[in-house]
Image (tube, rainbow, N blue to C red):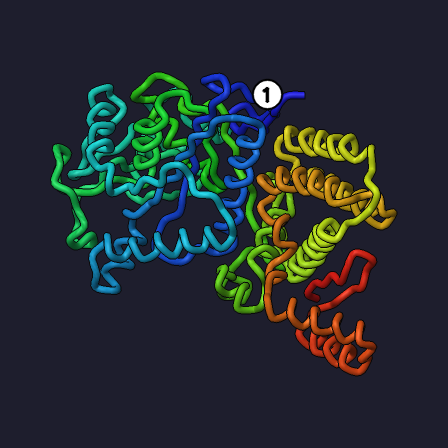
Amino acid sequence: MSLRFYNTLTRQVDEFVPRDAGKVAMYSCGPTVYDRAHIGNFRAFLFVDLLRRYLKYRGYQVFSVMNLTDIDDKTIRGAQKEGVSLREFTDRFIQIFFDEWDVLRIQKADLHPRATDHIPEMVNLVQTLTERGHAYEADRSYYYKVETFPTYGQFARLDMSGMRLGERVASDEYEKESARDFALWKGWGTDDGDVFWDTALGKGRPGWHLECSAMSLKYLGKDFDIHTGGVDLIFPHHQNEIAQTEGVTDKRLARYWLHNEHLLVEGAKMSKSLGNFYTLEDLTSQGWKPREIRYALLSAHYRQKLNFTQAGLEAARGGLERIDACVRNLKFAEGAGAQDLPAMLAGHEAEFVAAMDDDLNYPNALAVLFNLIRDVNTLCAEQKIGPTEAEVARGTLRKLDSVFGFLDVDQAGEGESDEEIELLIQARNEARKAKDWAAADRIRQELADRNVIIEDRAGGTVWHRK
């Protein structure tokens, strides 16, 4: 079977055929850097991370671009409120954004271009659209004339009959019931303060939709392979991107459009008023580990709504403990060896590929991982895995972890390398050899008080956290 994706452009699952054989050019809508990202944002970024990781696993040479929106109404208001320059304001949140990506083990794109670094490219786009009759000037701003793009609305499956064509909208976001001319370039107004550029279009700033068109064209060219984003961006943002870009190039913007669904929290839309609004910092301060958060945010198929719950985080913790226990079993494996281990591992990996090839069916891929872990644990218990076989199994787990990103194959769980715990376990084992049972029991209790569980096995003492 070949790699297949559900394509928003065609509304069906299509076989993936890249523009250039063996290579993937990919664009993802990135954050607006005016505040910390919330877990709904991270769900979208983790989907992109999973997609990029799997394409690399499948052997593709991936070139990915994710923009940083550092100019819009929100960033301007934030900078004005703090009394700092737009650049200083957005720099801080860009750094926080990347720091939190690192915590969640999200791999950076090859490029993260800032909108404000691409004003000349945006101006050129507006000039070309105006020359071609797709844009016009009104009140010192430039607007896209929707009626000049015959297929406008098809991507978002809009019924254009009865819609108020020809009316202008200056805001970047508007309701699905409207299909009005949208702003490409916004003439300077007093609300913008000192945020403006003097260009051939006059004094002003770009509209939000224009930014992605300019940057995707510059770095990926025409007819690139994959464009991603949340379902909330299908209209108006992605529909407007298509109109802008194809209005200039007369070529398809992207071959495959992949959109991830929304995140709910405890069954409801995330809202500060409901008390279910979480940032990464909120969750880690509650004691949840980044691995557990990553696991939980990846737990549903990307095209299904994800209900993020405390129970889901507990399940993630339990799943990771099972994974870590298997890795520890391999660390202490001293069996005679199993001749059928390579075939078993290869079979599971083939099932993993079949699941992920099917529109990134992550839940099925995760089930395959736990079937593999079950079989490895059985072989360890039967003393059929020795050090050589254990390294073969770890090699397969490392390959899968290049996609999952939370297996910790060479660490067996966060904190296992804690020298103090290892020294306590060593002291307990020495007490047991000396038959000092009181000392051994005292150390076991101390470890239990630290939420560390120990198990004495033939190959040595293993431990894990509760």
Comparing 144 with 126, the one in front is 126
- Residue 209: x and y, percent? 34, 37
Extreme residue in the front direction: 434
Q: Is residue 222 left or right of residue 354?
A: left
Drawn side of residue 380 relative to residue 349, left or right: right
Q: Position of residue 151 (x, y in %)?
A: 42, 21
Q: Amino acid at mark 1?
A: Glu
Q: Nearer the viewer, residue 86 or 350?
A: 350
**Residue closest to the eye, 420 or 369:** 420
The residue that label 1 is drawn on is 15
User: Quarter of the image containing the N terminus?
Assistant: top right
Q: Foreground: 412 or 144?
A: 412
Q: Is residue 364 left or right of residue 26?
A: right
Question: Which of the 4 image quadrants contains residue 269?
Answer: bottom right
Does 458 appear above or below 66?
below
Q: Is residue 458 above or below residue 51?
A: below
Most extreme residue toward the bottom, as rendered? 438
Name the residue rendered at 37%, 21% in the picture.
Answer: 222
Where in the figure is residue 229, as x and y percent of width and height? Answer: 47, 38
Q: Tag 1, which secondary structure?
A: strand
For residue 332, say whether it is visible.
yes
